[in-house]
Image (spheres, rainbow, N blue to C red):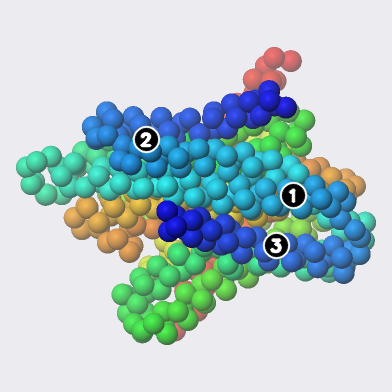
Amino acid sequence: MGNEFTETGKIILSTGRDVFPVIVLILFFQLLILRQPILHKKRVAFGFLFCILGLALFLIGLDKALFPVGKMMAEQLSAPAFIFGSKSNTAEPVWWAYGWIYLFGGLIGFSTTIAEPALMAVAMKAEEVSRGSIKQWGLRIAVAVGVAGGIILGIFRIITGTPLLIYFAAGYFIVILQTIFAPRYIIPLAYDTGGVTTSTVTVPLVAALGLGLSSTIPGRNVALDGFGLVAFASVFPIITVLAYIQCAHWLDQRRT
Amino acid sequence: MGSLIWKKAKKILRDLAPIILVIVFFQVFILQQPVPHLGQVLFGVVMVAIGLGLFLEGLEMGLFPIGESMAGAFARKGSVFWLMTFGFFLGFSTTIAEPALIAISGEAAEVAAEAGLITRSIEGQTEYAMGIRLTVAVAVGLAVGLGILRILLGWPLHYLIIGGYGIVILMTFLAPNEIIGIAYDSGGVTTSTVTVPLVTAFGVGLATTIRHRNPLLHGFGLIALASLLPIIFVLAFGIILFDR
């Protein structure tokens, strides 16, 4: 039990250490450059404390609950015994022999994105700034669908061993096309969601899946093929968010 | 008070329900195994829920207001130099110590050593990993600075982003294979859970304060630039270091 406590303390400390430079920076600029007192000092200080403590608890919980189970499942689902069955037929398998992995990757991508705190923050701001015309849940679901699609395609890439650049270039070609037709006001927000999706919750699970897969499949190099899933998860949300807003925009116009 | 907490708890439960359902479904129906250490897992889920609740509360009390009020104060002060300096250090300082970046740069050094691009020694690998970390942190700092300049001048974001990704695709042809995956991933890992709300609130606050700027059209976009510039910088790092 003592061990548990030191571990908990360590995570809280390391979260504090991550936030510390930000606090120093803010205080330095607020007091020496801007020379103005911080409004509602107590409330803001508590806010920061809540954020650090909340994030630490969140990470501890993930470490205890989701990561071990999720990683173990990623390993089991990508293990040769599960994919190829009991007969040890390890000849180059066809890409659709991995049905459960696609489903698992997609669902994990979707559900971890829904639980991503940074995305909640951006969605809250987006709803506030757009005066409610962009809905928090609509945006989050659109992003989550994008992450799911991105991961499924990323798994397909690892299995087939095709180069990253092809998918990346195709993805951006679609984004450029959508940008031309999308309503102006949504573009910056859609681009932002690409960077937001991949943080605390999604990356560790998805990375475990990528590394497990690339070590199971014959002819794949863990170092070269294991990377890149994160990049997929940041391109596709841009596409789905632009599509979501485009549809909402059309529906709005039809109604009026 | 009680009903308020219940309302918030229900919201958080809805945020976490999908992931719990997915794990239970696969564990019970596909892998057909009981969940190991069930007590510990349940305890972890409760921690996640409480942590998420605290974090969201802290956002509204601390991070959002301070980001917005500082943006307003900077705009009233009217010094572009200090504004961009602040932006640079905000990006740099939150990135250099980012755990995900430390992890990925260590792996990158491992890959490079394996491919024979750098000497296989603790010293050489540490230096290489530090090089990647510094490259990414400087890139994020410059990205936030550039993003602030964009808000001030009202440039449309999409030319910057589309042009930037064009550069990424061109540079990919020149860069050594071992750095490409890491460069692409480095764009995603840089934006952490504390940075995102702060930077977003700052951008929106700035666009709200400055006249003729629309918070939706100009306030967002800082994160997008902060995920683009590291890719370019890490690719350049690889090209300069290895293609002689």
Residue A46 bears which disc, if any? 1
Subunit of mark 3?
A
In the image shown, does A77 or B208 lie closer to the viewer? A77
Establish whether labels 2 and 3 are both on one chain. Answer: no
> What's the distance in space between the residues labelled 2 and 3, CA to CA?
35 Å
Q: Residues within 10 Å of mark 1 (few under 14, many from 20)?
A: some
As drawn, B146 above or below A46: below
Amino acid carrying label 3: it is Val
Q: Position of residue A95 (x, y in %)?
A: 24, 42
Q: Residue at x 59, y 26 (%)?
A: B10
The chain under label 1 reads A
Q: CA distance from mark 2 to mark 1?
A: 34 Å
Q: Position of residue B219 (x, y in %)?
A: 75, 47
Q: Quadrant of the C terminus of chain B?
A: bottom left
Task: Check disc 2 and give the amino acid type.
Answer: Ile
First of labels 1, 3 by sequence position:
3
Q: Quadrant of the N terminus of chain B?
A: top right
> Quick one: which residue is furthest to the left in this view?
A87
Residue A154 makes an appearance in the image: no
Disc 3: which residue: A22
| Rendered image quadrant of residue B122 | bottom left
Q: In the image, what residue occupies the spot 80% across and 47% down?
A: A43
In the displayed structure, would residue A166 be above or below residue A245?
below
| Disc marking residue B151 | none
Check disc 2 and report the residue beneath it: B23
